[in-house]
Amino acid sequence: MEFDINAFAGSMNMDHIAVVLVCTGLIILIMSYWGLWHMFQKMGIDSWKCLIPIYNSWVVYRVIWKSSVFWLQFFIGIMVNLLPTSDIPYKTLIVIMGIAVDAVITLMLHYKLARAFGHGIPFMLGLCICPPLFYMILGLGSSTFELSAPRKLRMTTITLKGQEYPIHNYDHINKLMRSDKKAAAVVELSKITGMTYEESVEILDKWYLYYY
């Protein structure tokens, strides 16, 4: 007996289709946040932060790359959505350029995220094509998080929240950074100073210059 796809489609009403779409969306959403929850744990970030839209992206950008890049992409997203309804010259060209820049930023972020967990370009492509699945692989799999540390010292003393932090007081942290173990340096610095993971990342970002 042959399967008649047209008859099957005709037998389904819009309610059935809506239920299937909603269930599929929920499954994808659960997969995504489940993977992010465990991925944040491996990154040394409080897992609950992955549950807050927009903020979770900002946290990842701040640890993996720079928070300023997140705000650039955020602004581009707003521009791309608002320009089509505006009346300015060359708006189509500006929108196309905005989409292209947004795509490049997303590719670079996924590459940095994949590399921080010990993967390469194929994994980056997987993150671009199916983020929920690959978040689960990063969070629940055997991958370990270890950022590549910048080796070029930018400044020796920085001030955060009125407290001065000279790098020469933290020789162990400096050795970890020189050994290309930024994630371990962040954890150690947060333990020594009592700062949050994100504050420790901020200090290391100011101490050292990123050249990649």
Image (cartoon, rainbow, N blue to C red):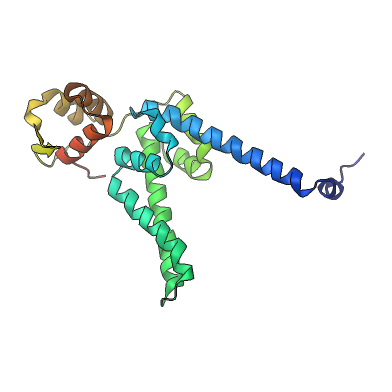
Residue placed most toward the observer, 175 or 77 = 77
| Residue 20 pos. (x, y %) | 70, 41
Q: Is residue 177 left or right of residue 142?
A: left
Quadrant including the C terminus: top left
Q: Quadrant of residue 210?
A: top left
| Residue 126 pos. (x, y %) | 50, 40
Examine the rendered structure and indicate whether residue 68 appears above or below residue 42.
below
* Residue in the picture at 24% in, 29% down: 186
Total numbered labels placed on residues in the image = 0
Q: Is residue 96 in view?
A: no
* Residue in the picture at 25% in, 25% down: 187
Examine the rendered structure and indicate whether residue 118 appears above or below residue 125.
above
* Residue in the picture at 76% in, 49% down: 14
Q: Quadrant of residue 165?
A: top left
Q: Quadrant of residue 194?
A: top left
Q: Is residue 90 left or right of residue 146?
A: right
Examine the rendered structure and indicate whether residue 17 appears above or below residue 133.
below
| Residue 134 pos. (x, y %) | 50, 35
Q: Is residue 182 in view?
A: yes
Residue that lies at the very extreme toward the right in this rendered image: 1
Q: Is residue 85 left or right of residue 158?
A: right
* Residue in the picture at 39% in, 34% down: 49
Residue placed most toward the observer, 178 or 165 = 165
| Residue 99 pos. (x, y %) | 44, 60
Quadrant including the N terminus: top right
